[in-house]
Amino acid sequence: MQLNFSIIIPTRDRRRQITRLLDSIRSVSGLAQIRPEIIIGDNGSSDQTWEMLRRSSADFPVPIRLFKIFGPGKCRILNEAIKISTGDVLVFLDDDVVVDA
């Protein structure tokens, strides 16, 4: 049985950090075989984070699903991402981490 993974990332005004995170995910060995879905929730960024995410998701090697929520609360983003996820396993990452390849 192959498990499906959903990687859930909340963000707000962290364009540089989430760019580094996505670059590190892109370089993970075997990413194409794992084929996770990536779900990124933006909480009203004002620093071009949303625009960068839209551009990056277009040519990313695995599906990226984006959504926006306005108002305070990281939990709101996490709860919404859980609702729309399709994975058997949910992986939660903060936008300022880097994944080892």
Image: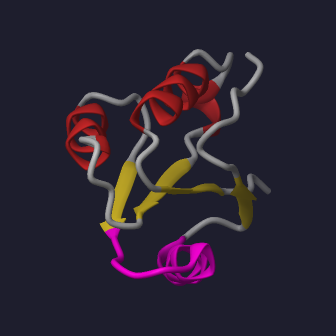
Where 31 falls versus 77 (above or below)? above
Quadrant location of the C terminus in the rendered image: top right
**Percent position of residue 24, x then y:** 60, 21
Which region is colored magenta?
A: 68-85
Q: Main secondary structure of the magenta part?
A: helix
Where 84 falls versus 24 (above or below)? below
Relative depth, front residue between 76 and 56: 76
- Residue 23 horizontal side relative to residue 99, left or right: left
- Quadrant in the picture for residue 48: top left
**Percent position of residue 18, x then y:** 49, 36
- Quadrant in the picture for residue 97: top right
Relative depth, front residue between 72 and 77: 72
Q: Residue at x 61, y 31 (%)?
A: 33
Q: Residue at x 79, y 57 (%)?
A: 1
Q: Residue at x 63, y 65 (%)?
A: 87
The total of numbered circles placed on residues is 0
Relative depth, front residue between 75 and 7: 75
**Percent position of residue 65, x then y:** 37, 57
**Percent position of residue 98, x then y:** 69, 27
In the rendered structure, does residue 58 fall within the stretch colored magenta? no
- Residue 30 horizontal side relative to residue 58, left or right: right
Relative depth, front residue between 77 and 83: 77
- Residue 97 horizontal side relative to residue 68, left or right: right
The colour scheme applied to this rendered structure is secondary structure
Q: Residue at x 34, y 78 (%)?
A: 70
Where 98 falls versus 29 (above or below)? below
In the rendered structure, does residue 71 fall within the stretch colored magenta? yes
